[in-house]
Image (cartoon, helix red, strand yellow):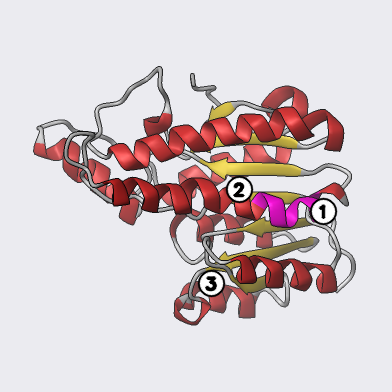
Amino acid sequence: MSSPSTVYFISGAGRGIGLGLVKSFAARSDSLVFAGARAPEKADALNELAKATGGRVVVVKLDAGSDEDHKAAVELVKQQDGRVDVVIANAGIAEGPALTATGPPEAYSKHFATNVVGPLRLFQALLPLLQASSKPQFLAMSSAVGSNTLNLAMPNDPYGVSKAALNFLVTKIASEHGEADNLTAWVTHPGLVATDMGNLVVDFYKAQGVDVPFVTVDESVAGLTKLVDNATRETMGGKFVQYDGAELPW
């Protein structure tokens, strides 16, 4: 395979939005996509995609809490190309319900470990490879539930608090590495997508008699792909942008 024009690294790529993004970028003949999955041996759809794309998808074992996995992933990327142009921190968890008065502290710790420390670990591991890119980009998958301004009524406080913390983390990455490394760092709300996580939200609202429309994985991925393709530090750096391009308040 000749040197790819764009190298992507996507965590949480075994299903849902992550898998959809891998499919989208791997459809391009000049791309190389490293697809992180916690248990690659169980990621059947991802493995089939890797076989079908002729080497454009490289499946990587990546547990959000494993330093060893991240070190091994970096070495693998170095062997293949030596740079990463776009990192998408997509791996995350959403468990609940849990409120501030009753939610166990362990639930907050668990969400923070995956949804905040996980993306931080990914950023720190891949930063040298991003610095080798002429147009590096770091995107973290957040949620409108993490917006302090919107303050959406969703009884999953550990998840919402972790996403608010993720938002702050990425604003710090943007301010510390935007100009210094020409890095475009931003967060997105992918929409209420018809995935395992999205179903939990819809079930909650339906129980209250509220009809909340789904966004399909394909719709979300199409919007996110367009945003990633066109992102610059001036247009996206340090911002919270929905899959359809609408900017959200912190």
User: Which quadrant does the N terminus fall into?
Assistant: bottom right
Q: Residue at x 38, y 35 (%)?
A: 161
Q: CA distance from mark 2 to mark 1?
A: 14 Å
SS of the residue under disc 1:
helix
Which residue is drawn at the image coordinates 49% and 21% (left, top)? Answer: 250
Q: Magenta stretch mostly in which secondary structure?
A: helix
Q: What residue sits right under mark 1 in the picture?
A: 128
Amino acid tagged 2: Leu
Q: Earlier in the sequence, mark 1 or mark 3?
A: 3
The crowd level at tag 3 (other Cα within 10 Å; few <14, some 14-19, many 20+) is many
**Residue 243 x/y as whole percent:** 52, 35
Residue contact between numbered discs 2 and 1, judged by CB atoms under 8 Å = no
Residue 93 in the image, given as x and y percentages of width and height: 39, 53
- First in sequence, mark 3 or 2: give its number: 3
- The magenta span reads 123-130
Report the side of 124 relative to 36 (left or right).
right
SS type, badge 3: helix
State the SS at label 2. helix
Task: Choose mark 3 or mark 2, whichever is in front.
Answer: 2
* Residue holding disc 3: 46
Of the residues shown, which amino acid type is indicated by label 3? Answer: Leu
